[in-house]
Amino acid sequence: MMDATVFAYRKVFYESQLQGILHDVCVVYQQICSNGNKVPNDENVIRNEFGKYFSNQTYKSSLTTACRYYYDYESCLQNTDGRVDMRFLPLDCFGVQDVFFAIECKRLDGKSHLCKEYVENGIRRFTTGKYPSYLGCNAMLGFVVCAIDLCATVDKVNSHLNTPEYLSTKSTVMFPMVQLISQHTTPYNFVLYHLWTDFSGLLK
């Protein structure tokens, strides 16, 4: 029988790996900001700005964690009609079904409609099993496209969730990047990390 400490170790390991990937997402975000290129207010176009860096092997080799993962986007999944915005697949598990970290991207403007979209077409893709959480953790990447009241926006997102699922702050709340976390029990126990990045000054 496998000792419970093994499961605890795996949980800590995978969550630390995902946090490392999100750190690299922050590094890429800062690079995008420093370039100063304007982008349209379009979720896929903004996502593809990140993809330019994660698909560049020379650049990716300079990152601390993502360098050890294969990156792809808009990937069709087996046994579902889901298409994940970003995937990071362990190089030693490449091609193994469901073994990857998924990052779903959504725009946020502080208004009710996009907050609802963030839940129904973002978080719920994980809680319904449309996107697998085999590694016990995945992430949401929010693109904040205008000035928002952060606390009010979190409250609007939470209004579409059950109380145990509420987003809570994981780090110091300070734009241009904010990290939050939510705990979920369906279809099994897993964690979602939420990284919100400010694109309000980078839009055409």
Image (spheres, rainbow, N blue to C red):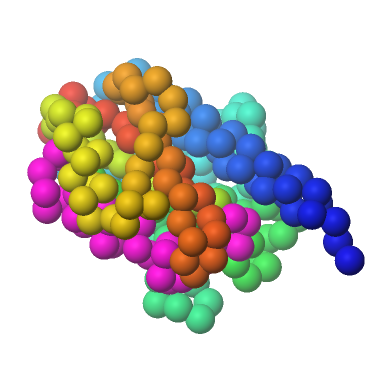
- 74 is higher (above) or lower (below) than 56: below
Nearest to the observer: residue 167 or residue 57: 167
Dividing the image into 4 quarters, which one contains the N terminus? bottom right
Q: Is residue 43 visible?
A: no
Dividing the image into 4 quarters, which one contains the C terminus? top left
Q: Is residue 123 visible?
A: yes
Q: For residue 134: magenta?
A: yes
Please identify the residue farthest to the right as the structure is shown.
1
Residue 50: x %, y % from top left: 40, 39
Residue 38: x %, y % from top left: 21, 30
Which residue lies at the image location 26% right of the left edge and 29% below the top edge? Answer: 198
Which residue lies at the image location 64% right of the left edge and 29% below the top edge? Answer: 64
Which residue lies at the image location 54% right of the left edge and 65% below the top edge? Answer: 188
For this view, does 197 lie left or right of residue 84?
left
Q: Which residues are magenta?
A: 109-136
- 29 is higher (above) or lower (below) than 57: above
For this view, does 3 lie left or right of residue 162?
right
Residue 152: x %, y % from top left: 17, 35
Residue 148: x %, y % from top left: 15, 30
For this view, does 116 lie left or right of residue 18?
left
